[in-house]
């Protein structure tokens, strides 16, 4: 069986965490014997690429994009279709650019979802949102996975090497520089906290992309205390960011299931995550603390992170690593997708983690 993954771009500098997740999923699926074809919209006609690959199943990722149009055309040809919105129907995200999205919804996106064989939710809150749409389509709850780092592999120096004091404690933000990530309240909280508490040895390192350099220019015009932007990171340098940081922060307003948060837990970092990251289990196992996109609340959790003893930080990190090992291994996620594809083709029973009506 061959599956065609429709995505906006295979370049992680353009697709962010979604692109990383799809690439990792594809690798895990291949390791379990599935033939996989990545069909990015920025590489040409996605429908033609899927047909040429002999796809038996189409898996479309994201909404409001060219991939949705290609998915509708492929569905009309009779191919089973899975659609993963990746959090793009989360209420906060849906309100952004409300009128254009509303027009796109009624022009075609609703039809894409309504005619799919199944929708994939990355977390329970997203499954609830998808079911609330009232579409006659089942919903499969399959999370993102994460690779477990091998700490025996030597890492290059982090991108802040030589730019920060050697004794600096680094709190890492890694992700797109986008309003939904809660960067603005984070920067406000960081400035107030470091000034009011007299903090001198903690640094906020921002690793990301997506704003055309606007954040970098802003920090050049008005530097903030102990804040450093290092731009986009990938590969071993991305790993080095996690491997050399002392904590991770993501105060998002809205997420599907953030890859960066899963990666940070896999690296054993204490995490400061908003409820919008949809990882309540991380709070339950004490791998993370709530960090809502609100300056006063963020100031309090920043102080709490700063007061962590080495032993307490190690305990939080170990809890996070155990959590992702048990719940977010790529082998497990890939097996679930293969079971889903087989069911949609009539070759297997309905999986227990699929809810809602039968496929249209």
Image (cartoon, rainbow, N blue to C red):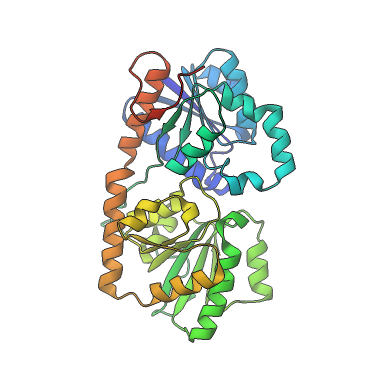
Looking at this view, is 284 or 23 the one in front?
284
Which image quarter: residue 179? bottom right
**The image quarter in which residue 246 lies:** bottom left
Q: Residue at x 50, y 47 (%)?
A: 17
Work out whether residue 197 or residue 73 is closer to the camera in this orientation and state it: 197
Q: Position of residue 84 (x, y in %)?
A: 51, 34
Residue 137 higher or lower than 96, as above or below: above
Residue 87 shows in the view: yes
- Name the residue at 55% across, 73% down: 189
- Indicate the position of residue 193 as horizontal and vertical percent values: 51, 79
Name the foreground residue: 59 vs 114.
114
For the image, the number of numbered tags is: 0
Residue 106: percent from the left, percent from the top?
70, 30
Q: Quadrant of the N terminus?
A: top left
Quadrant of residue 310 within the rendered picture: bottom left
Pick out the residue farthest to the bottom.
Answer: 198
- The structure residue drawn at horizontal position 59% and vertical position 77%, both measured from the top left corner, is 224
């Amino acid at each position: 069986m061959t599956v065609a993954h429709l995505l906006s771009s295979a370049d992680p500098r353009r697709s962010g965490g979604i692109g990383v997740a799809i690439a990792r999923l594809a690798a895990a699926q291949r390791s379990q014997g599935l033939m996989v074809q990545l069909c990015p919209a920025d590489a040409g006609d996605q429908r033609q690429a899927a047909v040429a690959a002999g796809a038996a199943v189409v898996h479309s990722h994201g909404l409001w994009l060219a991939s949705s149009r290609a998915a509708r055309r492929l569905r009309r040809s009779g191919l089973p279709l899975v659609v993963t919105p990746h959090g793009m129907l989360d209420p906060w995200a849906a309100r952004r650019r409300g009128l254009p999205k509303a027009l796109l919804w009624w022009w075609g996106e609703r039809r894409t979802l309504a005619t799919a064989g199944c929708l994939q939710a990355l977390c329970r809150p997203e499954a609830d949102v998808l079911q609330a749409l009232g579409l006659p389509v089942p919903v499969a709850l399959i999370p993102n996975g994460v690779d477990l780092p091998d700490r025996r592999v030597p890492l290059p120096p982090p991108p802040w090497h030589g730019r920060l004091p050697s004794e600096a404690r680094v709190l890492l933000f890694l992700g797109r520089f986008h309003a939904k990530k809660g960067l603005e309240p984070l920067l406000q909280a960081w400035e107030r906290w470091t000034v009011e508490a007299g903090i001198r040895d903690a640094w906020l390192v921002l690793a990301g992309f997506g704003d055309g350099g606007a954040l970098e220019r802003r920090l050049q015009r008005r530097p903030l205390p102990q804040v450093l932007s290092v731009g986009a990171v990938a590969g071993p340098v991305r790993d080095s960011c996690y491997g050399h940081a002392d904590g991770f922060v993501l105060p998002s307003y809205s997420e599907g299931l953030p890859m960066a948060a899963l990666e940070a837990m896999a690296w054993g970092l204490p995490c400061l995550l908003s409820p919008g990251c949809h990882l309540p289990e991380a709070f339950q196992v004490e791998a993370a603390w709530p960090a809502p996109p609100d300056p006063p609340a963020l100031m309090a959790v920043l102080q709490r992170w700063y007061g962590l003893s080495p032993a307490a930080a190690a305990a939080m990190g170990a809890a996070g690593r155990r959590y992702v090992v048990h719940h977010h291994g790529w082998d497990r996620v890939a097996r679930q997708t293969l079971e889903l594809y087989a069911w949609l083709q009539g070759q297997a029973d309905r999986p227990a983690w699929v809810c809602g009506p039968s496929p249209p």
